[in-house]
Image (spheres, rainbow, N blue to C red):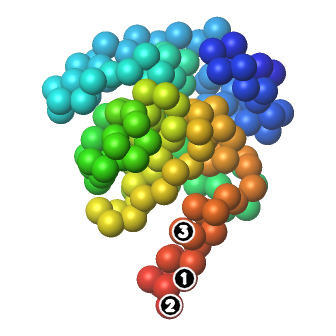
Amino acid sequence: MSDSSTHYELSDQLTEALTAAGWSPERQVDTISWARAVEAEGIPVSPVAHDFWQSFGGLKVLGRGRYKPPLELDPTEALHLWDPPERWESEYQQSFCPMGVWDSQNGLWVGDRGHVMIVFTEFHEREVATSPMQALESLLVGEPGPWKRWLGSVSRRWNG
């Protein structure tokens, strides 16, 4: 299945996970309340974030496979967690807007050029993907990337 806004081919597993959460290719939700909440925090809403929210906002998606925690695609939930580092704007040459929360405690942020970042704590963050659709694939059904291997090593250190 193809997503026309990004020309990204959705895997069957990702399509199943999204469909089980209430998504369809025609899905369009009202984003006004999210935009107001995000803008009230002084964060401009990019077209990339708006389009993502319109198709996927409000979904709670269960991951598929080994250690695939849930992904809550409510941008206001990320506002209550760690803020993205200010240096992202200069490093990635784009501004970031909240996308949702992964594993109930890690904020996801999407740049106005599509990069998706995850904030684990005030001091730990990583790039997840270069597009929102790649991020969904990685977080929900894909193989662990370098950032997930890093998270696993940090978890082992924290948990003995």
* Amino acid marked by disc 2: Gly
> Label 1 near label 2: C-beta < 8 Å?
yes
* Amino acid marked by disc 1: Arg
Q: Identify whether 29 is placed above or below 101.
A: above
> Label 2 near label 3: C-beta < 8 Å?
no
The image position of residue 68, as x and y in percent, is 64, 55
- Tell me the element at label 2: loop
Label 2 Cα neighbours within 10 Å, binned few <14 / some 14-19 / many ≥20: few
- Please give the residue where the numbered disc 1 appears in the rendered image: 156
Could you say which is closer to the camera, residue 55 or residue 2?
Answer: 2
Q: Is 110 displayed left or right of 130 in the figure?
A: left
- Please give the residue where the numbered disc 2 appears in the rendered image: 160
Q: Is 4 displayed left or right of 93 in the figure?
A: right
The disc placed on residue 31 is none
Taking the spot 38% from the left edge, 21% from the top edge, the residue there is 46
The disc placed on residue 151 is 3
Q: Residue 122's quadrant in the figure?
A: bottom left
Could you say which is closer to the camera, residue 60 or residue 87?
Answer: 87
C-alpha distance separating marks 3 and 2: 14 Å
Q: Earlier in the sequence, mark 3 or mark 2?
A: 3
Residue 60 can be seen in this image: no
